[in-house]
Amino acid sequence: MSHDTLSPEFEAVVAAAASAAPAFAATSPEDRARAIVAVADALEGAKERLVAIAMRETGLTEARLSGEVTRTAVQLRLFADTLVDGGYLDVRIDPADDDFALGVRPDVRRTHLPLGPVINFSASNFPFAFSVMGGDSASILAAGCPLIVKAHSGHPDLSDATAEVAAEALAAAGMPDGVFQLIHGREAGVAVLKDPRIKAGAFTGSIGAGRLLADIAASRPAPIPFYGELGSVNPVFITADAIAERTDEIASGYLASVSGSAGQLCTKPGFAFIPEGSALPDAIRAAAGELPEHRLLDPRIARSFAERRDAILASPGVRPVIEGGVRIDEQGQGWATPTVVAVSLDDFRRGKEALVEEAFGPLSILVETPQGTDLAALLPEFTEGNLTGTLHLSSEETTGETANAAELRALVDAISQQVGRVLFNGWSTGVAVTPAQQHGGPWPATTNDSSTSVGTSAIKRFLRPVAYQNAPAAFLPEALRDDNPLGVPQAVAPAGASKSWGREL
């Protein structure tokens, strides 16, 4: 195959990743785990220096960024333990069976192998946790795939500094040359994605850019999987009884979720459906007080948010609860205070085209619904796929024994069809880094709604299943051997069991 489309600089990068792939795939899970932990240790050791660079480039606070370095290290260590456990390989062994229900069964053994070199397009709004060494990078390396990171243009110096720390740690841990590399530039990222030696892509960012890259990956002569996390408005449903029970708590929690990190989070609640005439808007206004302005990530995001905010405020029937604002300084950076608006359900319907699109910044819309509105039927009318959906219920409603229990169950079912994570009495902007986490959802939340970018299942995106039939033990991957030297979980379908399948139901 020809690789003529790449410049000499990027040809060297892709060639190095391709050359490293066999050796990296052959490393033991324990060695890869130790290397990933070494990266986590190195990042925490360099935290003070890295956070200072990140503060300058992103405008995010020291506390937020320091916590994000810790989260990044935790993600890496979580995948290290995942490697040692081995359950992610989903090993299945069907021994040869002369008495199989359909005739003689051969010996069939299935495991998962690394895909090969992967390019990861890093995010702007999480300069550590979804960037150079964020969750996608951690799962790619854990899977045994050489990693090429396309740095985000919003924090280039931080990307270089983080990459230097990570590369030194991986090299010191004995990982092959070419296992981790960083590139800059949109055109470079696209060119690398098109290269036939690249076997998968990952992305966190806008719907437009994500769709463009996903289409490129799908239209290659040999299409490759592309895992993009894109846009989400994360609807919230708050019952009248919940508001009556804890008005101030809900108001302050909602406002904190909308305004945190200047609303530049993919899990920010974009809409909250509340009962018409409720006390919540006044409580939110009272909770706002004198909120400080927060710098947006970069001038492009600031301009986009200002335009989106103006369009929402201009939509008929929209009225400010907290007006907020955007100030552009002499460097073109935007400084925002939160905007919360309210609109009737009828006006929301009429202004749907102007209102339903995500506003990436500190803005959210309260949609006031009349009593008796079928919320389960309403949801598909306004939103497509989302990362999250949230319900706030009263303590009595959580028992499932109130008069509206059937309605609430129908709403939960409707939300579950459209999101990857359903929350109760909490806020979507907290994404726990834990094995069971699901951070994904139907389009346009992601390009692949069966995957997650947080949690241990994220590693499966960069593996492919392979079955070995009647393979001599000497040629089996260690995970499939009867002596199981890796100590991984093995699901065995014993000989002689097939004739009893389904018989005991």
Image (spheres, helix red, strand yellow):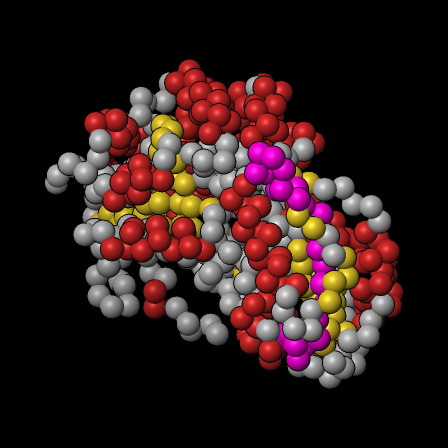
Residue 138: horizontal and vertical position, in percent?
Answer: 46, 35
Foreground pick, 256 / 405: 256
Does the rendering let one see residue 172? Answer: yes
Q: On the rendered structure, is 138 left or right of 51?
A: left
Residue 114: horizontal and vertical position, in percent?
Answer: 32, 40
Q: Any magenta on residue 340?
A: yes
Q: Any magenta on residue 15?
A: no
Foreground pick, 481 / 118: 118
Foreground pick, 130 / 41: 130
Does the rendering let one see residue 401? Answer: no
- Identify the residue at the far front of this view: 330
Q: On the rendered structure, is 125 left or right of 220?
A: right
Residue 243: horizontal and vertical position, in percent?
Answer: 83, 66
Give the total number of marks visible in the rendering: 0
Residue range (magenta):
327-349
Which residue is pictured at 48% across the width and 74% down the height? 505
* Quarter of the figure with the N terminus: top left
Q: On the rendered structure, is 389 left or right of 23?
A: right
Residue 90: horizontal and vertical position, in percent?
Answer: 40, 48
Q: On the rendered structure, is 288 left or right of 386?
A: right
- Identify the residue at the far bottom of this view: 372
